[in-house]
Image (cartoon, rainbow, N blue to C red):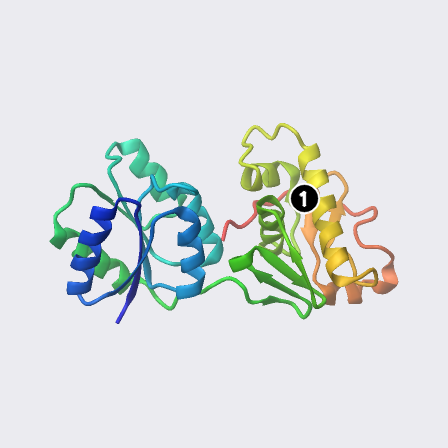
Amino acid sequence: MPKLLVVEDDAASVLALRELLTRGGYRVVTAADGREALRLMFAERPDLMLLDLMVPELDGWRVMARARDLSDLPVLVVSGLDDVEHRVKALRAGADDYLVKPFHPEELLARVEALLRRAGHRKWAGERVGEHLRLAPERRAAVWYGGEARLSEIEYGLLQLLVRNRGRVVTVKQLLARVWEDEAAIGGDRVKFGVLRLRRKLREAAGPDAPDPIEAVRGAGYRFVTAEEIDQKGDEGPIGQGSSAQERRPEAG
């Protein structure tokens, strides 16, 4: 029986959705705010999420962004925002479908069925990256050489983007746009200090003998280097000194 996560803060809407979806043959878990949605997303591993954009704590836009960090979970936005701009924005932000309130119950069930039919086996974040790093998005942490570092939202987003593009340079401009949501790329020092804080936390967690996995590429940006690559380069001197690289578009997920 497929499991659905309903993210909605209106009690009457939650009751109606739970009844409708349960009668439709689904198991239903509910979250009344964005933070609870993220916790349940990882704890319950649902097959699909129905998401209202106006939930408290973390709004639906941020929940959707984090959902894309955690998995390829299908997302059906169910919202009272009925203008084209919001629908287009949601679909471009990662929603798989968009249904405007009020809606006909049969249409909602049909859209859920269609999304589940198209969805394959879901992949979830948290797997090991090489031999010595594991990301733990459910508690926003990284385990580096056996030591766990608890990270801020910015630090975790920074590490995650670098890991996804490991072996490739992510520019300061790209980091500002993806992690700080600074499309104008103003304030590059934020990236430098963000990397310094992230490096310090990883070093404190793993111990002074653990290598630094973040390479600064002069004139370009930063890249994540696996422990295996560090070992291979051990005889060539410190990684990142004097290196350069061409700008490439980083992967979003």
Is 189 on the left or on the right of 29, as rendered?
right
Q: Quadrant of residue 44?
A: bottom left
Q: Is residue 45 above or below residue 6?
A: below
The residue under label 1 is: 246
| 82 sits to left or right of 244 | left
Which residue is depicted at the point 41% across and 47% down?
34
Of 72 and 235, the residue lying toward us: 72
The image shows residue 63 at horizontal and vertical percentages of 42, 47
Q: Is residue 84 visible?
A: yes
Residue at 19 percent across and 67 percent down: it is 25
x and y percentages locating residue 66 in the rendered image:
46, 50
Callout 1 amino acid: Gln
**Residue 183 shown left or right of residue 225 in the figure:** left
Instruction: Locate the N terminus by quadrant.
Output: bottom left
Which of the 4 quarters of the picture holds residue 174? top right
Q: Is residue 245 visible?
A: no
Q: Residues within 10 Å of mark 1 (few under 14, many from 20)?
A: few
